[in-house]
Image (spheres, rainbow, N blue to C red):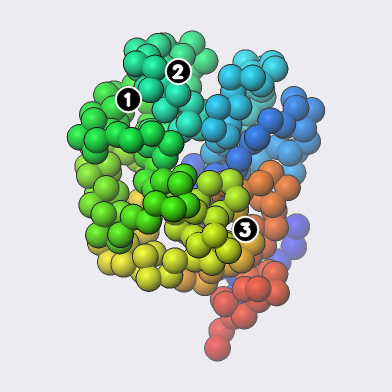
Amino acid sequence: MNYTLTQIPDRTAKPRQSGLTMVMDKGLSLREVEDFLSTSAGYADIIKLGWATSFVTPNLKEKLDIYREAGVPVYFGGTLFEAFIVRNKFDDYRKLLDKYSMEYAEVSDGSIEMPQDEKCEYIRTLATQVTVLSEVGSKDEAKIIPPYKWIQLMKAELEAGAWKVIGEAREGGTVGLFRSSGEVRQGLVEEILTQVPFESILWEAPQKEQQVWFVKLLGANVNLGNIAPHEVIPLETIRLGLRGDTFTQFLDK
């Protein structure tokens, strides 16, 4: 930090197991990646190349190399995994991970129907090759999953070998954990937390109000994802109680 302030919450140090900020790269140029890392590499824990943008991203290898040189790991979005699975190309997906020396992978079923046993088997298999993040929830805003099912899915996928389970919200924050207005499904989140450790969950929360809600509920070291590159530093100030929304959160009463 550039100077000293008291009554600032302790943040976990990188490489973190909690307090993660997952950043969504939806097609940054190489120059934009360099500029982003020059200010935010210390606060970005992992980068997701959104959905299947890696399929059409120019200079993909060079982009991955820039992130790696900065010590920030990258993974392909879960929709790319689903695109391979729906075409019966799982082995090709595993070869793709090796081709680009990927150390992380996301397993999801937000766009396709997949039996839970099958999804857990993909997790078990990939966990022998990479660190797996597993996404729970549908991208279909009309599909409402009851809390008990979220809990059952999250537990099963963690037991299958997922490092973290991701609560689905899409890049807009209007499905899954949230209503179409962006409002948090508070009862759903609170019920999940009765049975799944908060350190094991990465909550997709692209909107500022959603980030504030989770920091107020779970503290500075909540795992948050789908953060836009230009919102990484603003999020860090929310975590530290240095933005109006959380200004009194960590002050001595």
Name the image quarter holding the C terminus.
bottom right
Is 114 displayed left or right of 33 in the figure? left
Q: Which residue is mark 2?
A: 97
Q: Is residue 79 left or right of residue 181?
A: left
Viewer-proximal residue, 71 or 243?
A: 243
Report the disc number at residue 207: 3
Identify the residue at horizontal 60%, vertical 27% (top origin): 53
- Residue 183 point in image, percent of width and height: 54, 66
- Label 3–label 2 contact, CB within 8 A: no
Q: Which mark is residue 215?
A: none
Q: Place residue 94 in its image quadrant.
A: top left
Please tell me which residue lies in front, 55 or 87: 87
In primary-sequence order, the first of circles 3 and 1 is 1
Identify the residue at horizontal 30%, vertical 59% (top origin): 146
Amino acid type, label 2: Leu
- Mark 1: few/some/many CA within 10 Å (<14, 14-19, 20+): many
The residue labelled by disc 1 is 126
Q: Residues within 10 Å of mark 3 (few under 14, many from 20)?
A: some
Q: Camera-side residue: 66 or 155?
A: 155
Task: Reply above or below: 73 against 2.
Answer: above
**Helix, strand, or loop for circle 1?**
helix
Q: For residue 59, say whether it is visible.
A: yes
Q: Residue furthest front?
A: 142
Query: Could you say where residue 136 lies in the image, as x and y percent from the top left?
Result: 37, 46
Vertical order, 148 against 23 (above or below): below
For marks 3 and 2 on the same chain, the one whose residue lies earlier in the sequence: 2
Mark 1–mark 2 Cα distance, whole angstroms, equals: 10 Å
Mark nearer the viewer, 3 or 2? 3
Is the Cβ of the residue at disc 1 closer than 8 Å to that at disc 2?
A: yes
Q: Percent position (x, y) of residue 196?
A: 29, 57
The residue under label 1 is which amino acid type?
Answer: Leu
